[in-house]
Amino acid sequence: MTPEQIRLVQSTFQMVVPIKEQAAELFYNRLFELDPNLQPLFKGDMKEQGKKLMATLGVAVSSLTNLEKIIPTVQDLGARHYDYGVKEADYDTVGNALLWTLEQGLGEAFTPAVKEAWTQTYMTLAGVMIEAAKEAPMHNEIKALMIQALDKMARNEL
């Protein structure tokens, strides 16, 4: 991502902040319209889910000038999304819903340059999440083996 793309994402996100509740609602409505099979992945209160989405986006957007700082958090998010049942193909649907939502919320400010900047941002973050999700099964297996070993140690079986 270029410095100009980062500036565009950060400045346009500030335009979304005042309408963040409506933007979150638009996003999830569009997401479920694009793929109704994703709706069962969301079990909680959708208003709360929307708040979490906008808070997460806010942190990511504000950290674009120092992505290394949030990479571990983004990786953890990707691993958790794997555990929730999110598939790699779902990231395309989410990206499409996000860009559509931004277009609705920003109106004329959603220029081709802004679209490209947001696309690059999403692809960067989603790529990190997808890679972490690919590693999640191995990490889950290692965690399970460690728990088994600790349990055996606690029972003096090792």
Image (spheres, rainbow, N blue to C red):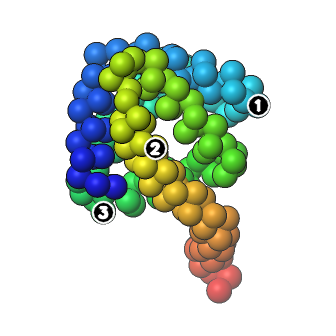
Q: Which mark is residue 37?
A: 1
Disc marking residue 95 = none
Dot 1 alpha-carbon crowd within 10 angstroms: few under 14, some 14 to 19, many 20 or more: few
Amino acid type, residue under disc 3 in the picture: Glu
Q: Amino acid at mark 1?
A: Asn
Q: Can you identify the residue that label 2 sits on?
A: 119
Mark 2: few, some, or many residues within 10 Å (few <14, many ≥20)?
Answer: some
Q: Nearest the camera: 98 or 70? A: 98
Q: CA distance from mark 1 to mark 3?
A: 33 Å
* Label located before the other in sequence (2 or 3): 3
How many numbered marks appear?
3
Compared with 4, 109 (above or below) is above
Residue 45 pos. (x, y %): 55, 19
Do tag 2 and tag 3 residues touch (Cβ < 8 Å)?
A: no
The answer to whether residue 48 shows anywhere in this view is: no
Sequence-wise first label, 1 or 3:
1
Report the residue marked by disc 3. Answer: 68
Seen at 38% across and 59% down, the residue is 71
Residue at disc 2, secondary structure: helix
Q: Is residue 148 above or below residue 111?
A: below
**Alpha carbons under labels 1 and 2: distance apart:** 24 Å
Q: Camera-side residue: 90 or 96? A: 96
Q: Which amino acid type corresponds to the residue marked 2 in the rendered image?
A: Thr
